[in-house]
Image: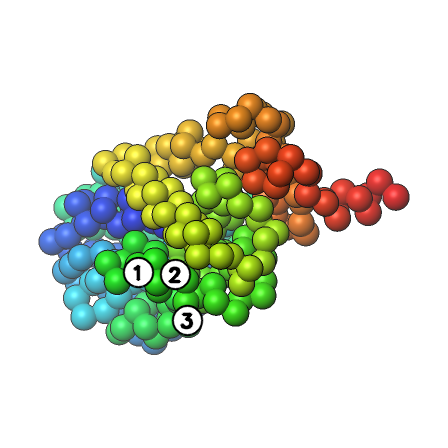
Amino acid sequence: MPELPEVEALREFLDEHLTGRVVERVLPLAVSVLKTYDPPLTALEGGLVGSTARYGKFLALRVGELHLVTHLARAGWLRWQEAMPEQPPRPGKGPLALRLVLEGGGGFDLTEAGTQKRLAVYVVRDPQEVPGIARLGPDPLAEDFDRDAFAALLAGERRQIKGVLRDQGVIAGIGNAYSDEILHAARVSPFKLAASFDEAQVTSLYEAVQTTLREAVARAHGVAAGRLKAEKKSGLRVHGRTGEPCPVCGDTVRSVSFADSSLQYCPTCQTGGKPLADRRLSRLLK
């Protein structure tokens, strides 16, 4: 799933390639993609593209007085094309969900792999009309998101820190991959209760949030949209690297599986050398 650093890079890319252009047409090609109907997609046609904003993992493209907002979900992506095919695409065929064509050529496709269609597109007058944006917590890279603001979010939070970091209503933009990376950088167990952090641990975790995300944004800066996925994977130290040596201590990276996801961690760096219980795997072995 694209997370804050990749979505921020897409925002920069679209700002550079779309600002000042005019939308010629917008074609919805998957039944599930469009989540709003008033204003219609056709209201974007002929509109001048303004700046692009990021809200957590959401992208909001200003077109005239409206906003085209998208959330790429787990398997969605944006594919830029300098020249669009002359033949219009056939709805319902392949991963193509939506196509935006610019006057004078070029534009982008929104695609989604797999069978679980969760990619979402909204046309709204204000991005805050999108329910997912309205409920977002603070952006971790915002200027006013300091150590004390972070500490206030953890205070009284009885959930495991992994789940807290991924909760978009608490902090916007962090997902499964970067929460693993943040916790590894901070040398914290993903199962540690958020409210149990002492002052020094809160500071260490806050610094890990800032360093991990800012370094990922810097790596993605200037990378073409089509190469962002590979760039993300190349920068990950533990996430998606089960069975590989930890780049810090050399211990084997381990995994805990859940119903529809998994987390990765280093026992030596994060859990005092003790493997975490993988309840799903334990049930399978019974």
Q: Say which mark, if any, is on residue 150.
A: 2
Considering depth in this image, is 106 or 258 the residue closer to the camera?
Answer: 258
Taking the spot 72% from the left edge, 44% from the top edge, the residue there is 278
Q: Is residue 223 visible?
A: yes
Taking the spot 58% from the left edge, 58% from the top edge, the residue there is 193
Amino acid carrying mark 3 in the image? Arg
Q: Residue beneath label 3, please?
A: 135
Q: Dot 2: within a 10 Å radius of its alpha carbon, few (fewer than 14), some, or many (20 or more) residues?
A: some
Residue 164 lies, in percent from the top left, at: 51, 59
Q: Residue beneath label 1, please?
A: 145
Taking the spot 53% from the left edge, 45% from the top edge, the residue there is 188
Amino acid carrying mark 1 in the image? Phe
Q: Secondary structure at mark 1?
A: loop
Considering depth in this image, is 66 or 235 the residue closer to the camera?
Answer: 235
Q: How many marks?
A: 3
Residue 31 lies, in percent from the top left, at: 48, 61
Q: Secondary structure at mark 2?
A: helix
Q: Dot 1: within a 10 Å radius of its alpha carbon, few (fewer than 14), some, or many (20 or more) residues?
A: some
Q: Earlier in the sequence, mark 2 or mark 3?
A: 3
